[in-house]
Image: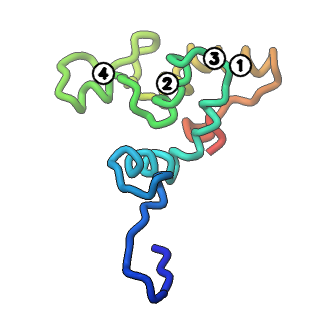
Amino acid sequence: IDVQLSDQPDSTHWKLAKNGVFTVKSFYMDLINSGPISRSLHIWKIKVLLRIKIFILFVHKQVIVTKDNLIKRRWVGSSRCCFCDQDETIQHLFLECPLAKLLWRTIHIAFNIHPPVGIESLFGT
């Protein structure tokens, strides 16, 4: 909080809104754009469809509906990956599954991009 002493009557000014008035939206936007999520702001500058940007953000936040996340929500079903029969997590689906490894190997050969070691490193965080 920035406090300035003066002879004027006390007043408040919400610095997260242009008009100085508190709104839930301004507070929410500040929460979203602070911490680890702020590093993902470069996602919005990529020239792809909005739904792809949102998907990338969900992968980054690790909230994609994979089988392990479904089970946390009381889903009843197999937690196994349909490609390789290992437990399906975001890490597994995008990096550890043999199919994902094949895709990353192809990307490495074609573009000389090294495969990430984790979801965090996938986004440079």
Query: Reading the chain from its start, which is encountered first: label 1 or label 3?
Result: 3
- Mark 1–mark 4 distance (CA, rounded to whole Å): 26 Å
- Mark 4–mark 3 distance (CA, rounded to whole Å): 31 Å
Q: Secondary structure at mark 2?
A: helix
Q: Which residue is mark 1?
A: 105
Q: Residue furthest front?
A: 8
Which residue is at 30% across, 21% downward?
79
Query: Reading the chain from its start, which is encountered first: label 2 or label 3?
Result: 3
Q: Amino acid under label 1?
A: Arg
Query: Reading the chain from its start, which is encountered first: label 2 or label 1?
Result: 2
Position in image of residue 61 (x %, y %): 46, 37
Which quarter of the rendering shows the C terminus? top right
Q: Which residue is mark 2?
A: 54
Relative to the observer, which residue lies in front, 54 or 115? 54
* Vertical placement of residue 4 versus 106, above or below: below
Relative to the observer, which residue lies in front, 79 or 111? 111
Which residue is at 45% across, 89% downward?
7
Residue 63 falls left or right of residue 111: left
Contact? badges 2 and 3 (CB < 8 Å): no
Label 1 Cα neighbours within 10 Å, binned few <14 / some 14-19 / many ≥20: some
Whether residue 107 is visible here, answered yes or no, is yes
Residue 89 falls left or right of residue 122: left
Q: Secondary structure at mark 3?
A: loop
